[in-house]
Image (cartoon, helix red, strand yellow):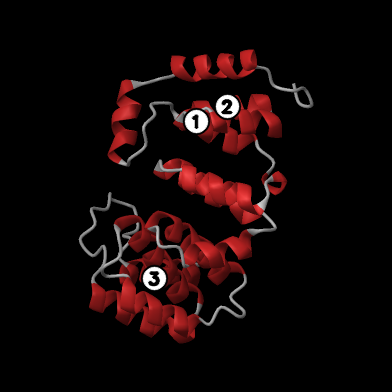
Amino acid sequence: MAGESPTDATVAELLAELAALEDPKARAVNEKHGDDHGVNLGKLRAIAKRLKTQQELAVRLWETDDTAAMLLALLICRPKAFGHDELDRMLREARAPKVHDWLVNYVVKKSPHAEELRLAWSADPDPVVASAGWALTTERVRKKPEGLGLPGLLDVIEARMKDAPDRLQWAMNHCLAQIGIDHPALRARAVGIGERLEVLKDYPTSPGCTSPYAPDWIAEMVRRQDAG
């Protein structure tokens, strides 16, 4: 229950519950994306809903280094309870892409340390850490672009995105698309950069899904905005 200190038994019971939900088919799908767990995320969210917010338990689950348990931790934690250094350590421990993604989107974006971490991570030599910085930059492009210097961001993307490692490239590409979608004055330049670099141009996209190729992504989202 909320407010109680988690015991080793509680953590062990949850690990056993997660292990019982292991689905080989789900694991096969997840492993294609670099995630080493086989728990259906809908079932994982159901456990989190039952547990509600439990910060101390979240910390204990994170410390297990079990991917499914770390994902559960991110769903039941209190984002503002983590300090700057704690979040930095957690990001460097979050090597599974889904854990990394949820940590940034569900926790760091709600943290009072988000802007400091954005600046530090964007300049980090580890491309996975840098990708988190770019994800936070994309959030600012969307919600608080003042002071970002968007033309300068486009300069950096144009110079570095083509040769960036996969996860960093993906994050920079998202930022490029977001600038094109949200800022009409820079749209033509964003589209032009995407066309010249051709990053993710041939990425396989399921029917009905929007391509991550920036020119197509921008065009589709702008079309939806105009239609809406």
Q: Is residue 112 left or right of residue 223?
A: right
Give the Cα separation between the discs numbered 3 and 1.
30 Å
Q: Are marks 2 and 1 in contact (CB under 8 Å)?
A: yes
The residue type indicated by label 2 comes to Ala
Label 1 CA crowd tier, 10 Å (few <14, some 14–19, many 20+): few
Q: CA distance from mark 2 to mark 3?
A: 34 Å
**Picture mark count:** 3
On screen, residue 96 above or below 190 = above
Residue 218, numbered circle:
3
Is 91 left, or right, of 52 in this rendering?
Answer: left
Q: Which residue occupies the extreme left position in the image?
A: 202
Amino acid type shown at disc 1: Gly
Farthest-out residue, right: 3
Instruction: Tell which circle, 3 or 1, labels the residue nearer the N-terminal end.
Output: 1
Query: Which element is circle 1 on?
Result: helix
| Residue 54 appears in the figure | no
Please tell me the numbered disc located at residue 189: none
Query: Disc 1 marks which residue?
Result: 42
Number of other residues with Cα within 10 Å of mark 2, as a class: few under 14, some 14 to 19, many 20 or more: few
First reached walking from the N terminus: tag 2 or tag 3: 2
User: Which residue has dot 2 on it?
Assistant: 46
Which amino acid type is marked by label 3?
A: Ile
**78, above or below 131, in the image:** above
User: Which mark lies nearer to you, 2 or 3?
Assistant: 2
- The x, y position of residue 189, in whole percent, is 37, 84
| Quadrant in the picture for residue 174 | bottom left
Q: Position of residue 57 (x, y in %)?
A: 66, 28
